[in-house]
Image: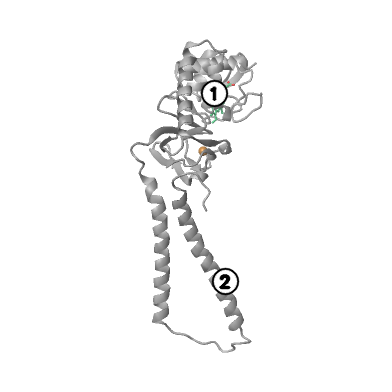
Amino acid sequence: MYSGASNFVSGTDDAFVVIIGISVIFLVGITAAMLWFTYRYSKKRNPVATQIHGSNTLEIIWTVIPTILVLGMFYYGWAGYQPMIKAPDDAMNIKATARMWSWLFEYENGIKTDTLYIPKDKAVTLDMVSPDVIHSLYIPAFRVKEDIVPGKENKMWFIGTKEGSYELFCTEYCGLSHSYMFTEVKVMPVDEFNAWYTRMADNAVQDSTKPVVPGAKGKQLVQVNGCIACHSLDGSKLIGPTFRGVYGHNVVVVTDGKEREITVDDEYIKRSIYEPNADVVKGYIQGQMISYKEQLSDDEVAEIIEYLKTLK
Ligand SMILES: [Cu+2]
């Protein structure tokens, strides 16, 4: 009966069906009663109004029945919600970072992705953080949704029970490009997931030993860290200036309220990433970009610079 892909589907849908069912019965009943009264007690059929003063039987009926109904709704709501509170101890931990305006998922072996990959039939806990504003993680097919408040520990857990890809997005309006915070959760059979998990970890190790295309690693960092939500690669202006041709070009920035022209070099890019508000590019709003000091090491910034150099 239920289409969905997690252990919480039937609990949530049961509560939903019970509440909607009761509401529909009342909607139909009240509408019918209203129509009947307007017909039966119109001035034509009932010219003299009957005055009724108090009825204990009625009072009791309309207190007891709604109480039972409301408690019934509460029961189903609680039964569906209660299992969501505590994750099993053997759950797999994944850190989810929500920021303006992209998602980042970090696994225990160091893999970072912008799509959430999980093994089928295994409990997964998401430790959710936000470095900027309030976001909210929602996976409709799993029936889970939780706000991600900066400075607070936000958690959710679930078991993906059906193989496939499902929508995952932010449901807290978090600024101009809120709609970019749209990605997928992929539920994979356990052996396929394990193969992916070790392959990705191997890649991460190989990257540092094998010679790679210049900027390849930086390109990956720029994608995974969500820079391209605000910086285009094709010359168009988004929330921030485009990355195309940025390296080596002259730009007017506002530093401490004063305008000055500088040439984009390694030093300037590093400063732009670590202290975005130190030099604000003229024509852009200060405070849109957050500092990536906690998230990107010096080496990673160097890789990003290599990548920006290739964007002629
Ligand atoms: Cu958001």
Quick one: which residue is furthest to the right in this view?
235
Residue positioned 54% across, 18% down in the render: 218
Q: Which mark is residue 222?
A: 1
Residue farthest to the front, as pictured:
191
- Seen from the viewer's position, the closer of residues 99 and 282 is 99
Q: CA distance from mark 1 to mark 2?
A: 58 Å
Residue 71 x, y percent position in the rendering:
39, 63
Along the viewing direction, whichever of 122 and 34 lies nearer the viewer: 122
Q: How many marks?
A: 2
Which x, y percent locates residue 246? 61, 18
x then y, percent, for residue 138: 50, 42
Residue that carries the numbered disc 2 in the rendered image:
31
Left or right: 300, with 60 as reference point: right
**Residue 141 visible in the displayed image:** yes
Place of residue 136 in the rendered image (x, y in percent of width and height, measured from the top left):
48, 41
Q: Residues within 10 Å of mark 1 (few under 14, many from 20)?
A: some
